[in-house]
Amino acid sequence: MFDIPYTTLQRHCARKDLRCYGGQTVLLEEEESNLSTVIVCMADWGFPMTFQGIRFIVKGYLDREGRRENRFEENLPSDDWVRGFLRRNKNLTVRLSENIKRCRAGVDSNCINAYFDNLEESLEGIPPGNLVNFDGTKFLG
């Protein structure tokens, strides 16, 4: 009556290989889950990701894997892709940063000295080769 091929009906009844409507995602479900975990971890460490940051992480990943994605210009996803990624990963949210009040941002010399005293105790006995400095743009050993 509707001219639906028998094999299509059979596949749907068996629930085999049913894909979502629309285009297929670039990253596998596991890869998107790992990316989501990394983004949450970075935010917990105090370095929330921007759309551009997420785009460059995906580009770097695809380049390292040797994968070429024709839907992206030079393997760099668009902002639309990031929006779709955020829709698929409901545990991620977009928040705008707010300036903090001066009284909360004020740090005195006692606070700074206490930080470095605590850092010195924490690093005691750790070889310098095992320390990593993260300056916000790259890792330095």
Image (cartoon, grey):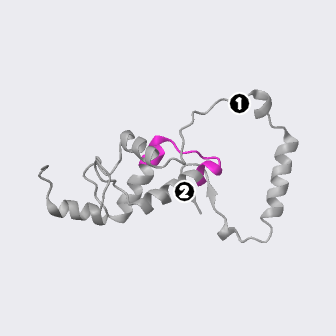
Image quarter of residue 138? bottom right
Q: Nearer the viewer, residue 94 or 43?
A: 94
Residue 89 at x, y percent in the picture:
48, 49
Q: Which residues are magenta?
A: 41-55
How packed is label 2: few (under 14 Cα within 10 Å), some, or many (20 or more)? Answer: some
Q: Is residue 8 left or right of residue 16?
A: left
State the residue position of label 1: 100
Q: As shown in the figure, which amino acid type bears the numbered disc 1?
A: Ile
Image quarter of residue 120? bottom right
CB within 8 Å, label 2 to label 1: no
Residue 125 at x, y percent in the picture:
79, 72
Provide the secondary structure element on which disc 1 rests.
loop
How packed is label 1: few (under 14 Cα within 10 Å), some, or many (20 or more)? Answer: few
Q: How many marks?
A: 2
Q: Is residue 5 left or right of residue 56?
A: left
Residue 10 at x, y percent in the picture:
22, 64
Q: Outermost residue, front direction?
A: 1
Viewer can see residue 138: no
* Prevalent SS, magenta region: helix
Image disc number at residue 127: none
Provide the secondary structure element on which disc 2 rests.
helix
Q: Nearer the viewer, residue 139 or 25?
A: 25
Give the answer, above or below, for where 77 lies relative to 16: above
State the residue position of label 2: 37
Question: Where's the C terminus, which quadrant?
Answer: bottom right
